[in-house]
Image (cartoon, rainbow, N blue to C red):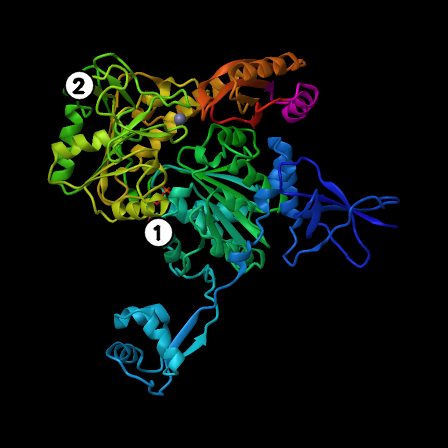
Amino acid sequence: MPVTAEILIPLALDTAYSYAVPHGLSLAEGDVVRVPLGPREIVGVVWSLEERPGGSNLRPVSGRLDVPPLAPALRRLVDWLARYTLAPKGSALAMALRLPDEAAARETIRVGVRASGRPPARLTPARAKVLEAAAGEALHGKSALAKAAGVSLSVVDGLIDDGALEAVALAPEPVALPPDPDFAREVSLSAAQAEAAATLVAGAAESPVTLLEGVTGSGKTEVYFEAVAACLREGRQALILMPEIALTAQFLDRFAARFGVRPATWHSGIGGKRRERIRAGVAAGEVAVVVGARSALFLPFAKLGLIVVDEEHETAYKQEDGVHYHARDMAVVRGHIEPCPVVLASATPSIESRVNVERGRYRRIVLPERFGGRQLPDIAAIDMRLDKPERGRFLAPPLVNAVIHTLERGEQTLLFLNRRGYAPLTLCRSCGHRYQCPQCSTWLVEHRFRRALVCHQCGHTERRPEACVECGTFDSHTACGPGVERIAEEAAALFPDKRVIVLSSDFPGGAETLRAELDAVAAGECDIVVGTQLVAKGHNFPHLTLVGVIDADIGLTSGDPRAAERTFQLLQQVTGRAGRGDRPGRALVQTYQPGHPVIAALLSGEAERFYQEEIGAREDAGLPPFGRLAALIVSGTDKEAAERHGQALARAAEPPAGITVLGPAEAPLALVRGRHRFRLLVKTERAVDIQSYLRDWLARGPKPRGNVRVQVDVDPQSFL
Ligand code: ADP
Ligand code: ZN
């Protein structure tokens, strides 16, 4: 009987397409194939095979690609991802299937050169220098040799052509050397760490998911390294997920101190050729440990034995475009599919994970104290109603004094403000004109280093004009409120002979340079760091003893149901940067609401009380994880058309008992990149299969026309 193959194509298509399998081609599920689609050929994956009569009118599969098939675990992950997020199945496949692009696949052959002993036909001074540098038996890299001799590469090439140097092809360097679980022979864990590590390793069979909760500086990393070691001893692979920017040299060196070599890393800065080699190494089981950002979750591990999600509470794990997925949740899914244990590590776990512990779905291992008898920082509030900064300044006198004392002791200060740029709003003193993005409903943020006004939503950039664009008055612009650049300016004015650095995600030079700067800060190469949330994420700065929070109230007023949780986590994390080295740390928190429950919990150190209150509040309100949420974002360039479509969707919602549909309401970010946005929010009881309801509703409901688009965000983390 003829065989039909269902081929899933990595494009935004929800169903697999049927193709005939031609005689002589034997296919298996997971094989990567070429198939005709319309006038062109495209790559897809065999999702299922079926013998069935007829099918003669189907177009045939063109052929199989000579690449490893997509493993069953990854195919199940793709199915799961698509079902859960409502993303088209093909889009989910695209995350797991990265085809080697031609250029990346062409392996460059590394060449070493050495002196052949034969004299060159012609000897110039430049050539003599090269031969001198190449004297002996050793092999040299071509460019290294040219550099050592201080000549151009063409001189070296000329000597090769002449026969005076011989070129030898070298084996490609492995992408990662095998880590040795027993490299650090005497791992000196504290008693608490050793106990936690033993529990973590021993109990993994019965409790596949563990929440490893330890205060900042408790040494969670050392503890989960023991789980990695146990996994390696079994000959299996481990994946450590981190927020992208936490992948610093400092972390990789800690790994190397424990395992002898640095792990393979996976993040957006890894280039095409290297990506392909890591992917191949992972698929062959040769790369034993990958430390990576969220997309590493879709790597084709051959024998995955452990997934660690470090800083599991981080919002950066949620992808907010394309397929809207949460990498922490998908890590748990992948662990279930493989199967392999999953460790979620955090000093400030998400409410979701804490509730999963209470429900008995995850187990919890706690490290209540800092490593090495170090104290948690002493946290105090500065009541901004009483201790006002000078006019036009943002650092209150008590904070300035604390910085002075810290500098006197030769220690580092972190001034934390979660706002990039110089000032979040620019207005004209003369006419009151406010500078707004032409395509978004956001104020333009002044960036003084770049001498520009920038939209943080779409990136629109314009020069800061000399005269008001509205009334033409010269020099009438005022910067309203502070961003990190403005705080840095104030710090530099107060302490002109100290080294001040600003660290935020728009640091010139991108993520790589930023990682290098973070390493420099850790090495003590600056006195005052002014930074956004990016410096709060799991970094270890041993010389840092003072943290000043410029505006603790920023996050409290947003309409986000997780506002309290997020603010608590962020403040706890950032204050936790202080005193991780030998000297004790302290934190000063500038606030107008010292009595707010979040601030009060932070000051008193009663994290547990905060969690219990917050969990209670979520339960009362039926919010996640006690109920489910999904958002539909309807957008279009024509405001009326987008709103009309939102209303038509709402009319078709017909929610049964247990489901509420709210909206459409104009989104807080009402205009982004020229598209008007409306939001609908679906709220259900926990027992409801929200995906089935959404699928059914969208199938029944009106289809968007023109350029109106509907994005589905299951379990939204952002409500903007
Ligand atoms: P956490 O991730 O829990 O905030 P880390 O794992 O970064 O904490 O550890 C905090 C600090 O304590 C780091 O400087 C780390 O090197 C040190 N540390 C933790 N455990 C040990 C250990 N067993 N031996 C030596 N140093 C340790
Ligand atoms: Zn914009």
Residue, far front: 472
- Where in the image, quadrant-wise, is ligand 2 located? top left
Q: Secondary structure at mark 2?
A: loop
The residue that label 2 is drawn on is 387
Specify the quadrant that holds the C terminus: top left
Q: Amino acid at mark 2?
A: Asp
- What is the C-alpha distance between the residues marked 1 and 2? 40 Å
Q: How many marks?
A: 2
Residue lying at 73% horizontally and 41% vertically, measured from the top left: 17
How dense is the environment of label 1, judged by Cα within 10 Å: few (below 14), some, or many (20 and up)?
A: some
Q: Is residue 566 left or right of residue 475?
A: right
Residue, far bottom: 118
| Quarter location, residue 443 | top left
Inspect the magenta stretch and tell me whether residue 692 lies in it.
yes
Q: Is residue 104 left or right of residue 649?
A: left
Q: Is residue 683 left or right of residue 448?
A: right
- Image: magenta residue range: 684-703
